[in-house]
Image (cartoon, helix red, strand yellow):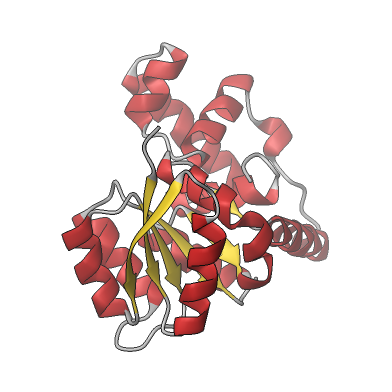
Amino acid sequence: MKSIRILLADDHGVVRKGLRFLLERDGRMEVIGEAADGREAVKLAEELDPQVVIMDIAMPQLNGIEATAQIFKRKPEIGVVILSMHSDEGYLIRSLQAGAKGYLLKDSAETDLVRAVEAAATGKPFFSPAIAKTLLEDYLSQMQQRGLQDSYDSLTEREKEILQLIAEGKSNKEAATILNLSLYTVETHRTHLMQKLNLHNTAEIVLYAVRKGIVC
């Protein structure tokens, strides 16, 4: 079984050392490079071709979210996992829009890092459990304040299936193949579910799915 190739990007050497230890004690993972700033992370991602990049959000020269966007633009097959101290929605949605596959809180790295890397290596999303809990609580609070109800139950069975597949990182074409539907049918269902849930892009679909516990 081949090792998962990983690039670590954090401006603190002691943090990189700790992350390397957590990863390499699992025999399926290999750290192939380390970057101390965002620009170096982008450069090494191109040169070393890792499967996964663990990216600190607060980086000198180029912050982690912008570095993620550049990596995603050049090599979208690389799974970037953002490592952050922030559990609020703003950072998460910016990370998703930049192309990140996962969002990991630093205080849960010891328990969740390996699972996050495994997910990102296969193109699946991963978020710290505390993220999903916080987002759901905030979402329910906002809905209550506005006197609104969640529209998830208004989705058809097919729309729910497509919502989950898109949130898991599948393209419309991949979802069509999995469900044995035409691309046009999947696109139509996707449009309808986004209208019902008032979602506007893939990042918002993923964010909604995290809140609902559809993906983790």
Residue lying at the far left in this picture: please name it: 47
Residue lying at the far top in this picture: please name it: 180
Q: Residue at x 61, y 77 (%)?
A: 85
- Is 215 or 126 nearer to us in this picture? 126
- Judge whether residue 170 can be spotted in this image: yes
- Is 65 or 166 nearer to us in this picture? 65
Q: Is residue 41 above or below residue 150?
A: below
Estimate the x, y position of residue 114 in percent, counting from the top left.
Answer: 56, 52
Estimate the x, y position of residue 201 in percent, counting from the top left.
Answer: 43, 50
Question: Looking at the rendering, in which quadrant would you find the N terminus?
Answer: top left
Estimate the x, y position of residue 5 in percent, counting from the top left.
Answer: 35, 51
Residue 152's quadrant in the figure? Answer: top right
Report the side of 172 relative to 127 (left or right).
left
Q: Residue at x 73, y 61 (%)?
A: 130
- Is 21 or 110 nearer to us in this picture? 21
Report the side of 215 relative to 170 (left or right).
right
Q: Residue at x 77, y 48 (%)?
A: 149
- Judge whether residue 201 can be spotted in this image: no
- Is 27 or 85 nearer to us in this picture? 27
Estimate the x, y position of residue 133 in percent, counting from the top left.
Answer: 76, 57
Q: Is residue 145 above or below residue 151?
A: below
Report the side of 165 relative to 42 (left or right).
right
**Count of marks, rendered view:** 0
